[in-house]
Image: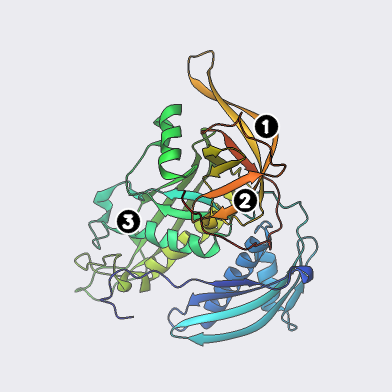
Amino acid sequence: MSSSAKLWIPALLGISALPATAQWYETTGRAMIRQGDEATARAQATEDAVKRALLFAGVSIRSVQQVTDGLLTQESLQVESSGEVQNVQLVSEMTRDGYFEVTIRADIEPTEAICPTMAYRKKLLITPFRLAIPEQAIVGDLFNIGKVSGKVFSSKLEEVGHSSWPAAYNNPIDVTALSYLERKALQQQLGARYVLSASIEDVSLGGTTGTNWTFWTDADRDRYYHLQVQVFDLAEERTVFSQKYQTTALWSHRKSTNLDPDYFRFWETPYGQAAERILNAAAMDVEEAIRCEPLQAEVIQVKQNQVLLSIGKAHGASIGDTFKLVHRREVPDSFGRIQPLLAVTELTVKITQLSSEAAWAESVNADLLANIQAGDLAMPNRKPLDDFGDEADITED
């Protein structure tokens, strides 16, 4: 792609699952080759591929460095590891279009029970990434770095997000300042329980690096990229995930040189590449943090023994999935604040029709649902990760 192409999203990785009975997962990782350094690109591509395999299998990515190091150093191109990762094999590697590609196969057995909501995707609202100190963006013309970083992050999360589903929300919002009724209205309006906000805290220049022997150029300097990411649960008014990421990279451009992040040229620089690695790491951490979070569908309509739920194909729902119905009441606490009170019923419904973000479900015992009303909730029962039923479109009366 030419440097003039308008918004470049860094290339991402593919993933596919082999038959579940064998517990083998195959993933492909890619990393840009910088200044001819294929060894570093190979290591980064391998690490990404291992992380994606672990995420897809539903296990923690904390052991990825050990596995990656073993995979890169063992002559047999495989590593034995206790616990979650039983075996990792290098399938192929190649260079293409300035990238190093590595494909691996991993035999993974989770040591912990997989959470019941992992097979579903939670809609995650991505608010605009904020540049905390805009004055720091003057050198290099990086005023768009917040907006573009948000797009790059969302693109990466789409690739690894087997339990999350990023959706752009273009208005900045302070979720911690919302009342219960405001949070509830936001959930109903946008069909999402989780909100991600991020702030780029520092893009300033550091000290000079090396010796500048040419008087007509500016000295090389370090430049910082500090990112703060938070995921907030609107339903329970709590922080699900909060993490700060920091990196430093060489900035070798003159003060008068503009490197708008909307363009490919920015992401080719050492600084752009360092920022991309931070965004990739953040996307993986968010996916791991949200995959076992609760998922509740809201009852939109009740019709005899059927309910219309706010969950659909986009969430990973399938024909035949079952849900427990939950009564929701709103009561004031001792401080006068409205709080939800949930009561799980004995009623179970099964999905019979699907659209993108809604589903009709009927009582498994043909019971009338007279006590259920709009605003109540449905909690999914556990379903296998490879359970994908036939789908039918919702039809209107």
Residue plotted at (73% across, 72% down): 19
Is 161 left or right of 63, judged from the image as shown? left
How many residues crowd mark 1 within 10 Å: few (<14), some (14–19), many (20+)?
few
Q: CA distance from mark 2 to mark 3?
A: 38 Å
Q: Which residue is mark 3?
A: 147
Q: Amino acid at mark 1?
A: Val
- Classify residue 54 by image quadrant: bottom right
- Name which of mark 2 and mark 3 comes first in the sequence: 3
Instruction: Between residue 7 and residue 217, name the one nearer to us.
Output: 7
Q: Nearer the viewer, mark 2 or mark 1?
A: 2
Instruction: Between residue 245 and residue 393, name the one nearer to us.
Output: 393
- Classify residue 362 by image quadrant: top right
Residue 351: assigned label: 2
Residue plotted at (39% across, 69% down): 9
x and y percentages locating residue 123 in the rendered image: 50, 50
Residue plotted at (64% across, 53% down): 118
Q: Which residue is mark 1?
A: 344
Q: Amino acid at mark 3?
A: Lys
Q: CA distance from mark 2 to mark 1?
A: 18 Å
Residue 23: assigned label: none
User: Which quadrant of the figure contains the N terminus?
Assistant: bottom left
